[in-house]
Amino acid sequence: MRNYTQFYIDGQWTDPVAPARTAEVINPATEEVSGQISLGSSADVDKAVAAARRAFAGYSQTSVKERLDLLETIQAEYERRERELGEAITEEMGAPLSLGCGFHTLLGKGHLGTAIEVLKAFKFEEERGVTLIRKEPIGVCGLITPWNWPMNQTCVKIFPALATGCTMILKPPQLAPYSAQLLAEILHDSGVPAGVFNMIQGKGSEIGTALTTHEDVDMISFTGSEPVGVQIQKDAADTVKRVGLELGGKSAWIVLDDSDLGANVAAATAGMMGNSGQTCSAGSRLLVPSSRMDEVKAAAAEAANGVTVGDPTGNFAMGPVVSKSQYNIIQQYIEKGIEEGAELIAGGPGRPEGLDKGWYVKPTVFVGTNDMVIAREEIFGPVLVIIGYDDLDHAVEIANDSIFGLGGYVSGQDLETCREVSRKMRTGAIWVNGGFDFHAPFGGYKRSGNGREWGDYGFEEYLETKAVIGWNPA
Ligand code: NDP
């Protein structure tokens, strides 16, 4: 049992200001209580913001060398405790251990390494004629994170903020609070100066709102659902904060009509089931040539049925989804797909056979149309919708017919055709035949958000631009 009842404020582990209120944390694989956290209040936020403001005066003036040394110390400590972080992720949100201790923690480490690389080369000052343009840390930042990729979403905010000289308050998700707690220990043990990093556990509606409305918070970076993103933008408006939003998606994966069709469909289907489908940029709409639908159905069904589901500490490809409430939402969408006439070709309602405890969902594949609810709304579970297209213009039209614009995928042998399609898709990131790049900007068009994280673009989120005119005499 984990007992995480203190917050990290001003360089110390401290008790909540108000009388303790706690919340149980449930292991989604067992439905049993795995630990507890304290729920903070606005008084804790006031305390943390005051500490962050005090620390900003000194930390914002540190040299690049000092911040690089700090990040490199954190890197060594993160690597030392990586296994522990992965195990915490598995326990809190149900990712298979191979994923929790694999890609989940690797993403956090990758953002840390990338922040170091970017910081080494970043130009904080540039002279242009009579003017000096300075990039300066924006100030005290409120970082609000979700549970689906806990280390990714946290590290992609914390490390650019630390690298640019900002101070911060992190509000982790109640559903997955453990890995953030360990990360706070890592930062403390690495010697992050008091007040630079603070962490308060608690409800989004209390801690999140206290941060977004706070007079002395300069910037909010949020990853999560679209309705909460909208609320945060409204709450932050009165104090004219900068708000970075990374919200939902309903990303299209276009498979070209070429000889690799079956293999590409199988890869896209298996990809959708990764992390139990709880990925904002997941390719949840698979667009395929209508003329080859029979071949596509066979490949997708075989791939989905081949995804093993079970105990995340065992040897399975997919664990449970994060909570009972997410399980219920996903079940409702599966029922909705059946009701609106989509053809179910794999999975379906209920738990996979043999699993009667834990929030396990069957890897599910529908063939449907783009006007169906299951093709328009973010399900955030292992549910794929296959949609047929007549030609590539039609495929692009379907892909762009969404309120979201976060990710996109194009698979096919002809690279020039893939590139042509990628230019026409209205989304913030597109993967052409796979690939991965920590330096590529990540963020959404349309209702998938604003701003960009990852790499040097991620630094800009935490920087103000100052022009000093007359720096050089005319
Ligand atoms: P939320 O958007 O509700 O939560 C994300 C974070 O925001 C959590 O830390 C949450 O706190 C906090 N929060 C909640 N309300 C507020 C508020 N008013 N002001 C400030 N912060 C707030 O996502 P859910 O966890 O409820 O997931 C629901 C859906 O969101 C999913 O089904 C999925 O569609 C989408 N989602 C998208 C993600 C993405 O990466 N784009 C990530 C996660 C979810 P608390 O601890 O109280 O929950």
Image (tube, helix red, strand yellow):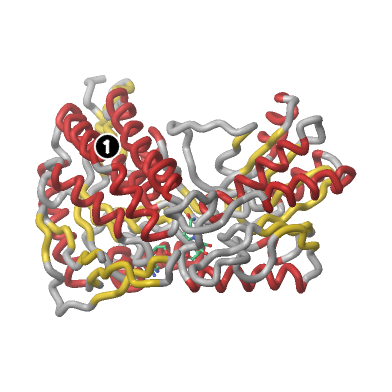
- Relative vertical location of residue 127 with respect to residue 239 in this rendering, above or below: above
- Which residue corresponds to the image point at 58% horizontal and 66% vertical from the top-left? 354
With 112 as the anchor, is 51 left or right in this view?
Answer: left
| Residue 391 versus residue 344 in the image, above or below | above
Residue 83 percent location from the top left of the image: 31, 44
**Residue at screen point 74% across, 59% down:** 366
State whether residue 245 appears in this view. Answer: no
Q: Which residue is mark 1?
A: 79
Neighbor class of circle 1 (other Cα within 10 Å; few <14, some 14-19, many 20+) is: some
Q: Position of residue 369 (x, y in %)?
A: 79, 59
Does residue 306 appear in this view? yes
Q: Quadrant of the N terminus?
A: bottom left
Which of 87/253 is in front?
A: 87
Which three-letter amino acid code belongs to the residue tagged 1? Glu
User: Residue drawn at (35%, 48%), measured in percent from left and top?
Assistant: 86
Residue at the (74%, 39%) spot, across then down: 255
Name the quadrant containing residue 170. bottom left
Quarter containing the C terminus: top left
Tell me if residue 17 comes above or below residue 347 in the rendering. Answer: below
Label 1 SS = helix
The quarter of the rendering in which ligand 1 is drawn is bottom left
Q: Position of residue 275 (x, y in %)?
A: 51, 52
Q: Is residue 230 left or right of residue 73?
A: right
The quarter of the picture where residue 94 lies is bottom left
Residue at the right extreme of this rendering: 291
Ligand 1 under 8 Å from disc 1 Cβ = no
